[in-house]
Amino acid sequence: MKNSKTAPVHGGRVYEAAASLGRPWEEIIDFSANINPLGQPKGLKEAVFSEFERTLHYPEIRAESLTEALAEQAGLPVECVLPGAGSSPQLYLIGRALPASRPVIIGPAFAEYEASLVSAGRVPTYVLTREEDDWLVNNDTVSRLFEERPDMVFLAHPANPTGRLVPFEVLSELARECGRRGVWLIVDEAFIDFTEHGRSLITMVQSQPRLIVLRSLTKIFALPGLRLAFLAAHPEVLGHMAGQIEPWSLSSLAISAGHFCLKQKSFRENTAGEVALLRQYLTNGLEKLNFCRIFPSESNYVLIKLNRGLDYRDYMAALFQEGILVRDASNFKGLGPGFLRLAVRPTAETDLLITNSQKYLENRNAGTA
């Protein structure tokens, strides 16, 4: 695999779309970024603004108070938790801080796994889940993984862009086997809060020194503009990594937002059930149009594959003209043209997506698309 100097393509490019269409950014409907469709917890804006005068001073150098709050909620010692300005900087920290010469990514997967490795001069290998298995990580996936003799493994639970959870018995045994073999296992749990039955590996970091778990507050609390995440690891590993990050990496407002959000227990608990209903609403709408295959998902997004003969670029362009963004998933390793990822959104936005999809199909059938 050749090193690429091209930045990974991501969703959520609302401001670029607004500028291109000549519309206010508030009018863009974004199905391309997987943010909580319920929005932010009530009272967050007021809570953050009430702390605005903190910006007169430097923030906590290592976000110490937030670290304590995160550790308490995770049920871990404070020495096991490292907050950061989103998961991407922490992926790059892993890439440069941990030794590995044979990294393997279980895909399809978030592009920043590879980008973080490449930036550290490492070229990853991929082991791909299969379309005929609905992209599920299973025992066959694990067998093929170890055939590559990895010393570092990246996977997401649930996976992005497929939305599939890893069966917990498979995941926990993988963690133990990686520990026995001395293999770093990086588990990205950025979307686990959106799942009804997802079980985290986070408490295993104390007994598995080769296990690192990434968690996000950005997605569940709808904070992509503030950037907030943390990783959990064994104290010895985390101490080594913490020494390689810059001071003041979290702003005072991000720290304040983190404290407020961690207290919103009912918001977090209610989200998974609401997302399941909204995901089903989206799936039902797509099924009625009969223009794509819809893969199973346990998260706040679904992967679809357009039927043969439909040009995904024309479909995306038609939606774009209506101010609707969807994620082209063709650049995920193991996928290809025709794969799209759709975030779960409120019903009114989903209705617009379905209405404009139907309009596109009707125009196409009439020869005007």
Image: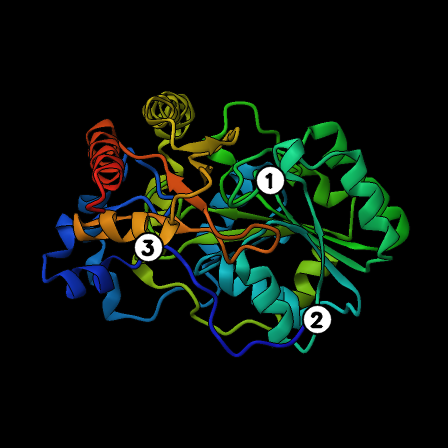
How crowded pointer 2 is (Cα within 10 Å; few <14, some 14-19, many 20+) is rated as: some
Give the residue displayed 34% in from the left and 25% down from the top. Answer: 278
- Amino acid of disc 3: Gly
SS assignment at label 1: loop
Which residue is nearer to you in this view: 170 or 350? 350
**Residue denoted by label 3:** 12
Which residue is nearer to you in this view: 303 or 279? 303
Q: Would residue 271 appear left or right of 305 to someone viewing this image?
A: left
Q: Residue 183 is drawn in which quadrant?
A: bottom right
The residues tagged by marks 2 and 3 sit, at their Cα atoms, a distance apart of 27 Å
Choose the circle earlier in sequence order: 1 or 2. 2
- Amino acid of disc 2: Val
The residues tagged by marks 1 and 2 sit, at their Cα atoms, a distance apart of 23 Å
**Residue denoted by label 2:** 123
Check the picture and name the quadrant holding the N terminus.
Answer: bottom right
- Amino acid of disc 1: His
How crowded pointer 1 is (Cα within 10 Å; few <14, some 14-19, many 20+) is rated as: many
Up-down: is 38 above or below 118? above
Q: Residue 309 is drawn in which quadrant?
A: top left
The residues tagged by marks 3 and 1 sit, at their Cα atoms, a distance apart of 21 Å
Q: Would residue 51 appear left or right of 344 to someone viewing this image?
A: left
Choose the circle earlier in sequence order: 2 or 3. 3
SS assignment at label 2: loop
**Residue denoted by label 1:** 157
Q: Position of residue 292 (x, y in %)?
A: 43, 34
Up-down: is 315 above or below 5? above
